[in-house]
Amino acid sequence: MSKIERFDAIVLGAGGAGLMCAAVAGQRGRRLLVLDHADAPGKKILISGGGRCNFTNLNAGADRYLSANPHFAKSALGRYRAEDFIALVDRHGIAWHEKTLGQLFCDGSSRQIVAMLLDECDKGEVTLRLGEPVRGVEHGDGLFRVAWGDSEATAPSLVIATGGPSIPKLGATGFAYELARRFGLKVVEPRPALVPLTLSGEEALFRSLSGVSAEVVARAGKTHFREAALFTHKGLSGPAILQISSYWRHGEQIGVNFFPDAAPDWLIEAKRARPRATLRATLARVIPERLAEALAERIGLGSELANLPDRALLEAGRRLADWRFSPNGTEGFAKAEVTVGGIATAGLSSQTMEARSVPGLYAIGEAVDVTGWLGGYNFQWAWASGWAAAQAL
């Protein structure tokens, strides 16, 4: 056994939140150790945004996050904003661009963001140890003692930044929750979020549309998103569906408006303009032909519009504006971009991310019950929560 090293804080997890926290605290003069069982840092960062890292969103307010306490994220997000991270990116000369809905991506590669965070850690003289799992965490006499491999270290502060169980092929586990429970913190039951939904039974017929996408408004309860939906061989995906999945619960239906710009009586107007057209042909003027064919077949109005009563066309328009699907599940943590749930915010300070009942213990990033929308929001939470904890270390 090698000698026990001493640090001001130990960060468990070399993802976005952990690296951000360590870099900021290190540059504040603290001696930081970052541990991760993965053989390389920032693995989720590397695969994000199709390899270009959707690193933040210009609209990252607390109302774009799910949590048992919808107000918890306000403090951290308000003190470290998207503009602050953009300024950091700019200082490192990383070119970026805005896509739709305030989403910011690297012009080049996600590797630039990881390299930037590691450079910031270097500036803070952060010690990074990778490739060996933590084999023990103890707490006593105001110190946390962490063992990994044949090494041990102590520190008065410990930061849980190991994320959630989404994308286990990258090494994701529920370790954060196990550790939190050991210290008496409650955990909101985790479930997959930003994840494709699966269909079965009669709705499985839509699998024949695999690869077809359309801009829709998808709705679960009172929440709705207007983006693309994609049919897959298992069910439904695409940005609109991924967004809704975070709000959907087993047993509930989702509604999809395939014609979000259409008036309620648009099919009656179409009958007046093109009386000889069929419903299928009319739908295909707006949405992909294969989708139009499937929807028209389900509605069952096969004759020309001129032969269809207005009330039937109104009912068809109503159904197309709120087409009901009954998902039988999701594609699980393997395909989920993030996790809803996690370490309960009731036990944490929203100012510092410190556990109220365990001085010196912090939880940040995806490990916490704060989950953002699709489009850079979860990275902004990682940066902001990591920064907030770093101010208190």
Image (cartoon, helix red, strand yellow):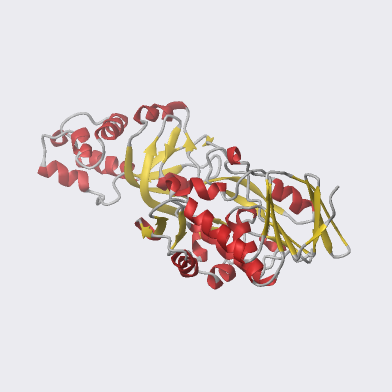
Above or below — where is 2 with respect to 202? below
Q: Nearer the viewer, residue 154 or 246?
A: 154
Examine the image and state in which quarter residue 150 appears: top right
Task: Locate residue 343 relative to residue 358 in the image: left or right.
Answer: left
Residue at the (52%, 61%) spot, across then down: 380
Answer yes or no: is residue 133 visible: yes
Above or below — where is 143 with respect to 297? below
Q: Nearer the viewer, residue 387 or 14?
A: 14
Answer yes or no: is residue 67 visible: no
Above or below — where is 30 with respect to 55? below
Q: Position of residue 374 (x, y in %)?
A: 46, 52
Examine the image and state in which quarter residue 171 appears: top right
Task: Locate residue 236 relative to residue 366 in the image: left or right.
Answer: left
State the count of labels.
Answer: 0
Q: Position of residue 218 (x, y in %)?
A: 40, 47
Task: Locate residue 256 relative to residue 31 in the image: left or right.
Answer: left
